[in-house]
Image (cartoon, rainbow, N blue to C red):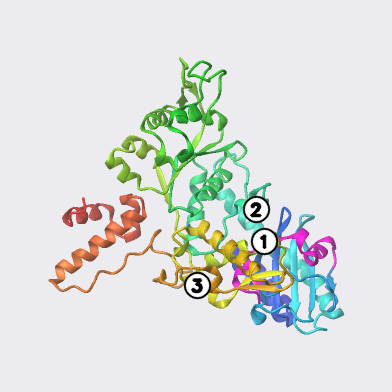
Amino acid sequence: MLHTPLLADLATDLPQAVRLQRLVAHLRERFHCGAVALLQLEEDHLRPVAVEGLVREALGRRFAVSQHPRLAAILARTDVTWFHHDSTLPDPYDGLLDTLVGEPLPVHDCMGIRLSVDGQPWGVLTLDALQTGTFGDDARAALADCRVLAEAAVRISRLEREVQALRTAPPLRGVDDERTPRAGDADMEIVGQSEPLMRLLHELDVVAGSDLPVLLLGETGVGKELFARRLHRQSPRAARPLVHVNCAALPESLAESELFGHVRGAFSGAVADRPGRFEAAEGGTLFLDEVGELPLAVQAKLLRTLQNGEIQRLGADRPRRVNVRVIAATNRNLREQVTGGAFRADLYHRLSVYPVPIPPLRDRGNDVLLIAGRFLELNRARLGLRSLRLSGPAQEALRRYPWPGNIRELEHVVSRAALKALSRGVSRADIVTLEPALLDLDADAVHTPAAPPDAPAQSAGPRAALPAAPTGPLREAVDACQRTSITTALAQHGGNWAQAARALEVDASNLHKLARRLGIK
């Protein structure tokens, strides 16, 4: 009975997430257990890819193998690992079961099995039941039989990702996929499953194969560096350096030398030739973070580099050729800076060949819970807690808060709340539950989405409030509403009229005409 639906799923063209979610749902039904989780091994931690019976934020957690002895024991064996009901080993899912939210797992049955693909450990499949005796000899034998089907499901999903990568890859590019993390990638992971994020990641993967300059637009704290790293990692330049330059931290007097280098004697203190960041990124990618902070004099030299592929060290007589792709990022409206004379128009057009608006956290629905789960697990390990979780009201508070500081603010909120809970005398051996009061969020700052949490977002920024009920002619009310919609869309997309037109679902030329009639242009 179990194998029939699983075999049918293997033969059906399903999205990866759907196939794996159906797998754990089938297993939970078959074994009559409380929770099933499929976790993928990445470096030294296990990442949940599909869960059934656990709270939603569990998908955002990353379980360090060294900190979870039950998971380590499952990984260490090739056959089914079963834990006796009086085992003293801590359970990684304490407080995370849907049916026992915030409560420790009582005496229960737990078993798991390691999954392998191409002879290498891929991850683990875990099952938890609240009733002892659920996983007897027959159940353990059945799980051993299921391993082949589970491994087939993850292998098919991996092959589908490889095929998709080959379809979108440039000629001669090797397949660079997310299933084989490099050292340090775990700390720079983009967490989330919302429709706006999935659309953004697909767009980035498509443009990654080109050498076009990309301008990442987004509010402070949305993680622009993470998306720049993904662009580089998915590009043909992935084997070469990615050099990060924080333009806001460059002293004006040293900005030119930092970017383009200098020769000996170019200025007081230049005792030797020194290459700049462009030369350090040779063959790779230069990420100019907060590019709107560059001095005008340096902007002129940057423009020449983008036009000619050449740099000239400060004090040198001859230019040098460089082969570097530039990714820039800003939280400012560069169009307004161009109008005000603080940013060169020609450089703006060079950098914004492909502008990419990054949605703020408030427009990413339930991603806020997954990201919070990641920070909860990090703080649990950092503080030596048995378990750290959110109460139901706390989850709702996170969903409704507008997050002006985005992901960076969320990280600080979770870390501060965990420390507050610990300072109030909770035991590290208890399940620590964070309530709304500990989060210390502004109760009056409430964001009410215009669509269900994971529905596709219609914009990359905050939604405008509806104008007050009109008291004058209908035409004036319509004009006011259109004016508000257009100016809001422009603000959300960094002044880019084409992006604003797409967000408003109107023809770009018609948008320009309407804007002129309304006095916006």
Q: Secondary structure at mark 3?
A: helix
Marks 3 and 1, Cα distance to the nearest angstrom?
Answer: 23 Å
Q: CA distance from mark 2 to mark 1?
A: 9 Å
Earlier-in-chain disc, 3 versus 1:
1
Amino acid type indicated by mark 3? Ala
Residue toward you, 399 or 111: 399
> Tag 2: residue type?
Ala
Q: Dot 3: within a 10 Å radius of its alpha carbon, few (fewer than 14), some, or many (20 or more) residues?
A: many
- Would you place residue 159 above or below residue 183 in this image? below
Residue in front for this viewpoint, 462 or 173: 462
Res 397 label: 3
Q: What is the span of residues highlighted in magenta in the rendered image?
A: 51-79
Q: How would you rate the neighbour count of disc 1 (Cα within 10 Å): few for under 14, some for 14-19, many for 20 or more?
A: many
Tell me residue 98's x, y (percent). 64, 79
C-beta proximity under 8 Å, tags 3 and 1: no
Position of residue 139 in the picture relative to residue 415 (left or right): right
